[in-house]
Image (spheres, grey):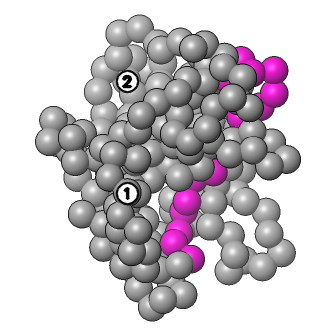
């Protein structure tokens, strides 16, 4: 379903788009800033905004480690995926981890912000899995593991989100997986 009408899609989806820009979420209270917004042109006639967590406020406020663990898997790509917005049943990190060697590193809040903004600035295409939302703009959030964490008891299996950057240099792509404190 290329360039699906976002109003008919609910729940989990996959999108592919041209990177436009990345920005740190603006907020007057720095303690509330917990996202980087990546904006894509997915051929929808309007920009698609991705909301990527860079810290867990819920874990921080509950006294747990607020850092995000990021696993980056790099591999070559042949052809680029088709641009658009598509329904998707959801990812399962455990399946991805069983078929790829993924090592997770803790990222401090600002280091993760910088990493994401840098990657959007050099990528030629971005692919994302997550939950579709519509507020003032159309976007995708929940781009992380959805298993129970230290501060969130809800355990959603097979509903994980991820982010994939495609780079012209050496035809490489990087899949980023995001986990919070206590997630397997």
Residue 175 rendering spot, x and y as whole percentages: 38, 37
Q: Secondary structure at mark 2?
A: strand
Q: Residue at x 60, y 13 (%)?
A: 2
Q: Measure the alpha-carbon separation of dots 2 and 1.
A: 31 Å
**Is residue 44 covered in magenta?**
yes
Compared across the picture, whether 122 is left or right of 32 comes to: left
The residue singled out by tag 1 in the image is: 156
Residue 108 rendering spot, x and y as whole percentages: 47, 70
Q: Residues within 10 Å of mark 2 (few under 14, many from 20)?
A: some
| Quadrant of the rendered image containing residue 61 | bottom right
Compared across the picture, whether 21 is left or right of 141 comes to: right
Compared across the picture, whether 8 is left or right of 144 comes to: right
Q: Residue at x 61, y 24 (%)?
A: 85
Residue 141 rendering spot, x and y as whole percentages: 59, 49
Does any portion of residue 21 appear in the rendered image? no
Task: Tell me which segment is drawn in magenta.
Answer: 42-57
| Quadrant of the rendered image containing residue 32 | bottom right
Q: Residue at x 44, y 53 (%)?
A: 144
Q: Secondary structure at mark 1?
A: loop
Q: Foreground residue, 82 or 120?
A: 82
**Is residue 36 covered in magenta?**
no
Does any portion of residue 182 appear in the rendered image? yes
Residue 70 rendering spot, x and y as whole percentages: 37, 55
Numbered label attached to residue 172: 2
Quadrant containing the C terminus in the rendered view? bottom left
Quadrant containing the N terminus in the rendered view? top right
Image: 3 above or below 92: above
């Amino acid at each position: 379903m290329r360039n699906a009408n976002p109003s008919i899609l609910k729940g989990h989806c996959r999108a592919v788009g041209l990177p436009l820009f990345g920005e740190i979420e603006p907020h007057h209270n720095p303690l509330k800033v917990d996202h980087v917004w990546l904006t894509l042109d997915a051929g929808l006639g309007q920009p698609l905004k991705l909301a990527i967590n860079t810290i867990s406020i819920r874990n921080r406020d509950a006294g747990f480690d607020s850092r995000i663990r990021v696993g980056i898997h790099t591999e070559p790509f042949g052809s680029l995926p088709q641009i658009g917005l598509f329904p998707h049943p959801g990812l399962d990190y455990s399946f991805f981890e069983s078929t790829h060697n993924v090592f997770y590193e803790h990222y401090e809040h600002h280091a993760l912000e910088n990493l994401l903004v840098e990657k959007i600035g050099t990528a030629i295409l971005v692919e994302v899995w997550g939950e579709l939302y519509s507020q003032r703009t159309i976007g995708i959030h929940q781009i992380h593991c959805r298993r129970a964490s230290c501060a969130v008891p809800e355990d959603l299996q097979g509903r994980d989100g991820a982010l994939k950057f495609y780079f012209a240099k050496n035809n490489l792509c990087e899949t980023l997986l995001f986990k919070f404190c206590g997630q397997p």
